[in-house]
Image (cartoon, rainbow, N blue to C red):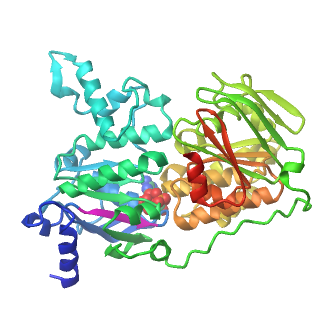
Amino acid sequence: MDCALEAQRMTISTHADTSVDPALFRSRLMMSGINKTFGRNAVLTDAGIEVLPGEIHGLLGQNGSGKSTLIKILSGLYRPDGEDAVIRVDGTDVVQPITPVGVMSQGVTIIHQSLGLIPGHSVTENIRLGTLSGRRFGRFIDWSYEREQARLTLERMQSDIDPDRLVDLLHVGQRATVAIARALQVIVPGSGCVVLDESTQSLSREVLPEFYGTIRQLARQGTSIVLVSHRLDEVLTLADRVTILRDGRVTAAGVATHGMSEAQLSKEILGRQLIAFNRVEKMAIPDAEPFGAREPAVRLRGVTGEVLRGVDIDVHAGEVVGVIGATEAGHEELPYVITGAHSSTAAGSIEIHTAIRDLAELRVSQSLADGVVLVPTDRAGQGLALGETAISNVSLPRVRDKSRHGILRAAWQKEEFSAACAMLNISPPDPDQLAASFSGGNQQKLLLAKWLLQKPRFFVLHEPTQAVDVGARADILRAISAIAAEGVPVLVSSIEAEDLSLICDRIIVLQDGQNSRELTRPFTPEQVQEAIG
Ligand SMILES: Nc1ncnc2c1ncn2[C@@H]1O[C@H](COP(=O)(O)OP(=O)(O)OP(=O)(O)O)[C@@H](O)[C@H]1O
């Protein structure tokens, strides 16, 4: 046996309580010889991963490098090509074809990026789905028992989400909590493997320390964790070792993270040094007085919704204003209320240039006509037409203007798509591929490109860097900063204090649906985080 690996295993064995257990010297999960091709695109080539009992193992790579495909092969959603694939759990081969239920019965639980919640059903139904049959009385389900089990499961995640609430009404962080809680409830302490495929990205910052505590506790008891994440601070905080994929091949197999810096890790992932983010200087605005001394381009007054209670914000031409807060502070709701996307409880007004719109009456179509563009966080549900091609998605907002006598110029559409690929490095740069078959991060880039090419009069974004890798994140922040530099007022709602501290001129902190604090540049991520409280 490889001495270095053996030494590493000994180190890792200190992580579990049972350091003399011989099972520690056998992998919990072993995948090798995994190949997968879609059309002409070789997505995985001889890929694999080895995860030890009680280990937290990061699976990393750029957007489109094949991480989710590897996980989907483990779950049985995709079949590997050829005959070389080996998948073993606790030394036992997982037989093909794998089924999600089959792999779960071998102790592997997977939380996919999409979270897999069933709309139209309650939190209890979503959490207890698959375990309901255990407590039927005749043909009846004991719902008070199921509700209590759901509540206890959520309690493990320090969450007080109402078990009777429809999942459709939860914000994105709460949805992630429900999906993770559902997966954790079936784990028997000391065994099994939990795969988190970018499922922590929308958990709010204040629950993260406790969530990390839960993960560490599981690992200490002997459960293995595979963590797919673009958040390098999270990976370095949690993971014992990492496996890195680049273009579908393993470039680092089970490398210990001890002593590694974020810069080293991002270099391993990208294969190059990360170019530091620089704000694009404001070119279009004659250098002029500070923002505060000028007339705002957008005035938001008395913005009210389910959580929001009379928020006032001004945004000036060329200014990037960030909005942040703790859970239920209102920052998750604001982008939708001010663009007419949530109108049932909305009140207040938006004034853009000379038009004043009543938010109770505002519809998305009116907002778009005013030049107000929203990049939503739910790219699958609200942002992209997943069943359409990449080129159609990117050019959609401008198709009507660019058609002549009802005929669309194919050359123009191709130019748009090329500009999008060049701006955000979309991969693969295949205009005819369906949006659904792009990787999560590349879908996010398609969504941003669709609206960045529009040159809006007011640009509103919610979590613009979700799901993207460390290189793409810098590209996206640069693109937002560039659009502001052309004089566009920009409002970004995000839980990413670091992103906001890089691009914003001002940051509004919301608390209980109201303006709480306002920070003016310069600020550090720590100062922003501190202001949230
Ligand atoms: N069903 C499919 N049809 C065609 N191509 C696909 C399909 N599923 C994935 N791909 C391609 O496989 C490649 C790898 O995608 P995958 O989702 O595994 O990447 P990833 O590493 O998880 O990326 P991200 O970090 O962006 O989520 C991408 O180029 C993607 O376009």
* Foreground pick, 513 / 446: 513
Q: Height in image: 193 above or below 252?
A: above
Q: Is residue 373 visible?
A: yes
The reply to whether residue 498 is visible in this rendering is: no
- Report the side of 142 relative to 476 (left or right): left
- Where residue 132 appears, x then y in whole percent? 22, 27
The kind of secondary structure the magenta stretch mainly shows is strand
User: Which quadrant is the N terminus positioned in?
Assistant: bottom left
In the image: residue 141, left or right of residue 253 = left
Q: Nearer the viewer, residue 65 or 43?
A: 65
- Corner quadrant of residue 340: top right
Which residues make up the magenta segment? Answer: 55-61
* Percent coordinates x, y for residue 119 in the rendering: 43, 30
Q: Nearer the viewer, residue 292 or 115?
A: 292
Residue drawn at (70%, 57%) of the image: 480
At x 70%, y 55%, the residue is 504
Considering only vertical position in the picture, is 189 above or below 80? Answer: above
